[in-house]
Image: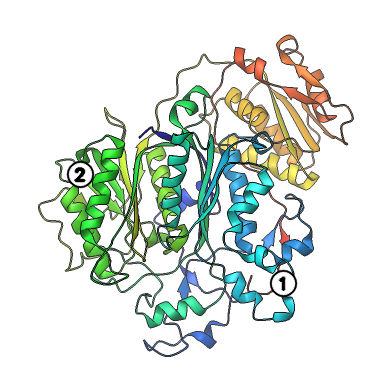
Amino acid sequence: MEPVAIIGMGCRFPGGENPSSFWSLLRNGGDAIAPVPSDRWDIDRFYHPEPGTPGKMITRWGGFLKQVNRFDANFFGISLEEAQRIDPQQKLMLEVAWEALEDAGVVPAKLSGTSTGVFLGISKSDHNRVLYQDLAQISATSIPDSNPSIVANRLSFFLQVQGPSMAIDTTCSSALVALHLACQSLQSGESELAIVGGISLNLVPEDFICLSLAGLISPDGRCKTFDARANGYGRGEGCGVVVVKLLREAIANRDNILAVIRGSAVNQNGLSNGFTAPNGLAQQALISKALANAGVSADRISYVETHGTGTPLGDAIEVKSLKAKLKSDRPCWLGSVKTNIGHLEAAAGVASLIKTVLSLQNQEIPAHLHFQQLHPYISLKGTNLAIPTELQPWSQEREPRLAGVSSFGSGGTNAHIILESAPENPDLRSNNESQLLTLSAKTEPALRELARRYQRFIQDNPNNSLADICFTANTGRSLFNYRLAAIADSKEQLAIQLGDFANAKETTGVMTGKAIGQKGAEILNLTSNRQNWSTIAQLYVNGGSINWSEFYQENPSHRLQLPTYPFQRQKCSLHNNE
């Protein structure tokens, strides 16, 4: 299989509003499980501690997002009235996908008309259930506003892309199956770029009740994966998106490669002990196929992000399968992000994927939470497998590091991905000249907040070069009407300039303006003007569009993961629990 590069990502997970804050949660061993928010449903009405009580759930806990009823409708060109009727999953996906594209340095407007594919894992729409509680709220657009498949289609429509647009539902493995299909689409030439993700929001109590009656929910809402106290899973919610393209094309384009997908596989349990029961032999076959597709041996795997939900039987079967396939003298860690944020069901696979990418990037393996004593159904004796109870170093070796990521659907569809650490960026000659940074936003408050985010980023990431920061911002962001241009000789100077602008203070070297329509639009060739930053900055803030391509051909730089757009969200929901 031809390798595929992950070049950008975005997320909203419990305790992690973006990849950076998500990594902080993971690295610090954070537990994001919390009481059911009061604006979702009256937990006292639906909770009962006695298992099997009709109409009641056995837990008060879960992994929840904040303010899922807020959305920047204006940014996406959607009226407030329409936004109020749209499934929050559609709105959340628009925002997170935009952030993932910005993280990749991809200008969304440049995707229009391209064969960019959209592959999203999604299994349900609680919005439907909320909507149908009040039949008077049903409108002529209620079906497209709440149909799960429309989540992918609305994103394709907004971006004006013409590649495959697919909503994948294999329950808990949906997002990882979507990634597998996206890789195949890239490898066949069907898609030139793919936006891949998963989403699941828990807006109503019904599924909590059903899963409680089935004995699958942990009373304390936590996944105690592999532990002797494991007693079911805790439900979570969230959204994650990655941007992928063929590795060779990412290298040629000097993209910021976060990790490499070396291989993937999908299969089905077939006949097992029960319709929803795992099949260990199928899991073993899946891992073997993924390794074969990746062209790597099992002894190179040093970490597996397991499906690991915290159900005693499922955990035991998964570990037994891993023991059968990952035989090596090399230590191999086993972890599960579900211990931090709960089981995100259709979005579980992308949460596992993003955690593993962050671990590869940061060369650390986070602690696996809620682990005190190995479950009696599980034995690790005589194996290289271990469970990290504290943060572990995962330093680069002679060969690139490899990890496996598993996701198993309750209906029997399984997926496994082989991830590799990103290749080293080529060394570029340092550029110590002054630089021009351009930023833009749809509103003045958003522009000030964007400047503040860049100020913090520069202060928190001292190893990034000024040239790389400006290159990424100048070439990898959309153009909006409210504009800022800053000329700086150093990162320290730029941080001060941006902070002063964010706080509405006068500062030198910064120009601002508002572009109105096409007035002042001008394509500038920087090969002859690159020393005249002031003229270029003034033309930019007045509405000019700068042609950076020839300039950066002579002045190559690296793409970075920079701050993303600060959406100006407002409440837009017809119901309190959305």
Front in this rendered view, residue 382 or 284: 284
Q: In this view, does 472 lie to the left or right of 439?
A: left
Mark closest to the chain's N terminus, 1 or 2: 2
Q: Mark 1 points at which residue?
A: 574
Q: Which amino acid does label 2 sit on?
A: Pro
Location of the N terminus (image quadrant): top left
Picture residue at 45% right of the left edge, 82% below the top: 57
Q: In this view, does 461 lie above or below 289?
A: above
Q: What residue type is labelled 1?
A: Leu
Q: What is the C-alpha distance between the residues marked 1 and 2?
A: 52 Å
Q: Name the residue under label 2.
A: 331
Mark 1 crowdedness (10 Å alpha carbons): few <14, some 14-19, many ≥20: some
Give coordinates of residue 263: x percent, y percent: 34, 40
Give coordinates of residue 558: x percent, y percent: 53, 25
Give coordinates of residue 271: x percent, y percent: 25, 65
Q: Is residue 178 visible?
A: yes
